[in-house]
Amino acid sequence: MTRTLPFGSPDDVRRELRELVEYGPCTGLFLGCSSSVAPGVSWENIRTLVDGLAYYRTQGRI
């Protein structure tokens, strides 16, 4: 996400978040924001990330 949030599109953010969930560990996966949310990241990408985190928090892996 370090390059995707500031330079990618909302679709790129969704795609990378999905890949992180799909290919991440089966248990103990923590998703969140860190220093990847730097000045200049578009509000659309931040909103997409927050919506995606909320989705996986409530729906889990499908």
Image: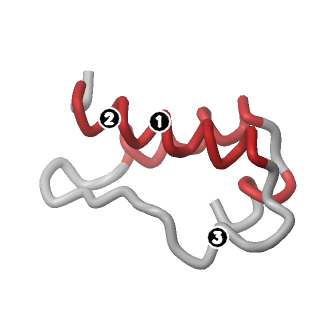
Q: Identify which residue is drawn at 71% across, 44% down.
A: 45
Circle 2 is placed at which residue position? 56
Circle 1 is placed at which residue position? 52
Circle 3 is placed at which residue position? 36
Q: CA distance from mark 1 to mark 2?
A: 6 Å
Identify residue type, mark 2: Tyr
Q: Are marks 1 and 2 in contact (CB under 8 Å)?
A: yes
Q: Is residue 28 left or right of residue 41?
A: left
Q: Is residue 27 left or right of residue 3?
A: left
Q: Are marks 3 and 2 in contact (CB under 8 Å)?
A: no
Identify residue type, mark 1: Gly
Name the image quarter holding the N terminus.
Answer: bottom right
Q: Identify which residue is drawn at 24% across, 57% down.
A: 29
Q: Is residue 4 left or right of residue 30?
A: right
Q: Position of residue 41 (x, y in %)?
A: 79, 59
Helix, strand or loop at label 3? It is loop
Name the image quarter holding the C terminus.
Answer: top left
Q: Earlier in the sequence, mark 3 or mark 2?
A: 3
Say the numbered circle drawn on residue 60: none
41 over 52 or under it: above or below: below
Count of labels shown? 3
Helix, strand or loop at label 2? It is helix
Q: Residues within 10 Å of mark 2 (few under 14, many from 20)?
A: some
Q: CA distance from mark 3 to mark 1?
A: 15 Å
Q: Identify which residue is drawn at 37% across, 43% down.
A: 21
60 over 13 or under it: above or below: above
Q: Position of residue 39 (x, y in %)?
A: 80, 72
Q: CA distance from mark 3 to mark 2?
A: 19 Å
In terms of image quadrants, where is residue 28? bottom left
Q: Position of residue 43 (x, y in %)?
A: 75, 46
Q: Earlier in the sequence, mark 3 or mark 1?
A: 3
